[in-house]
Image (tube, rainbow, N blue to C red):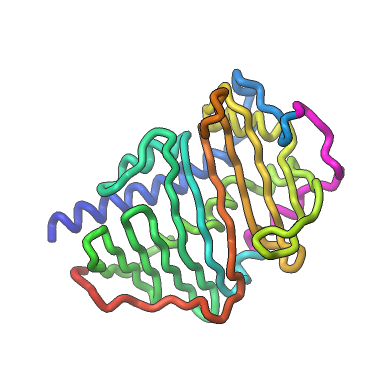
Amino acid sequence: MLRDVRRRQGLLAAVAFLSLAASACSGSSASAAPSGTPTAPGGNSGSSPTSAASGAGLSGAVANLSVVSNYKFKMTLAGGTFGSLFALLPVGGSTGNAAFTVSGMIVTSPAQAADITMGSFHIIEIGGYDYMDLGTGGFVKTPVTGTGLADSLSPATLFSSSITASTAGSYQLVGSESKNGVEADHYQANAAALAEYGSILGVTDATWSADVWLAKSGGYPVSVAIVAKATDKSVAYELSFDLTNVNDPSNSVTAPTNITGA
């Protein structure tokens, strides 16, 4: 039992720092660009977008996502602060620039619930309780207090930490296309915003790109990709997610029955 408690404390610490790691993107404006000058998406430094439309609509994307009934997601986190963060995980942690995947389902109505897989961990939140399988096949049940684990690991949290109301205007509309089966407007961060990402996150000598797709109907983020590639083309940093099965009646979360502790 003590072993389970210690492992759960390790997970809680890692999840708590996850929000802090993501929020680094929303820090104050950088005083200088990283030593490896970022290029604009497509490889043309400072190139003009195909549309001058402001990305101010991105600031309302999280609110729009909160009124979506349910969705499935897959999220990839790698490099930067995430590497040291996931080394804190007591089981199956990722280190360095290795990618770490978080996937699952979020239900916002008629009642909040979530079913999330994070490495070797399985987290279910429903009915005011967190159920955590720490890799043993059984779940530990605890009441949700404050911000639940599922909230900390949701695309909404990562999006709001990375693209704030003040930085949304640095994204510009570059076109419209189908993304994850949804008609979406495609936004890209401008060169100044890319330089700021690099400086704030401390990822130098890298080429940055930042893309967001907002659903034309509903205005919620369908896909996000903030990526830095080193000179050898390896991924130095990544925060990305894709939403699918939005407002799907078959999406549902059920509390587990194999409870091993509390």
x then y, percent, for residue 128: 38, 74
**Residue drawn at x 48%, y 73% as measured from the top left:** 112
Q: Quadrant of the C terminus?
A: bottom left
Location of residue 231 by image quarter: top right
Q: Is residue 37 magenta?
A: no
| Residue 32 appears in the picture as rendered | no
108 w.r.t. 183: above or below: below
Quarter of the image where one finds residue 117 = bottom left
Left or right: 246 with respect to 132?
right
What residue span does the magenta drawing correspond to? 44-63
Q: Main secondary structure of the magenta part?
A: loop
Q: Is residue 107 left or right of residue 217?
A: left
Task: Inspect this view and state whether residue 155 appears.
Answer: yes
Which x, y percent locates residue 87?
A: 32, 40
Instruction: Check the image and report above or below for 163 versus 178.
Output: above
Q: Nearer the viewer, residue 169 or 254?
A: 254
How far across and down, in percent of the image, does residue 131 sit? Answer: 31, 68
Q: Residue at x 34, y 68 (%)?
A: 130
Please give the name of the residue rendered at 26% of the width and 68% of the height, measured from the top-left corner. Answer: 139
Q: From what the image shows, is residue 97 above or below residue 113? A: above
Residue 50 painted magenta: yes
Tell me: 11 left or right of 193.
Answer: left
Q: Residue at x 68, y 64 (%)?
A: 181
Whole-percent x, y for residue 156 in the image: 56, 58
Q: Residue 89 versus residue 186: which sits nearer the camera?
A: 186
Q: Nearer the viewer, residue 72 or 139?
A: 72
Q: How many marks?
A: 0
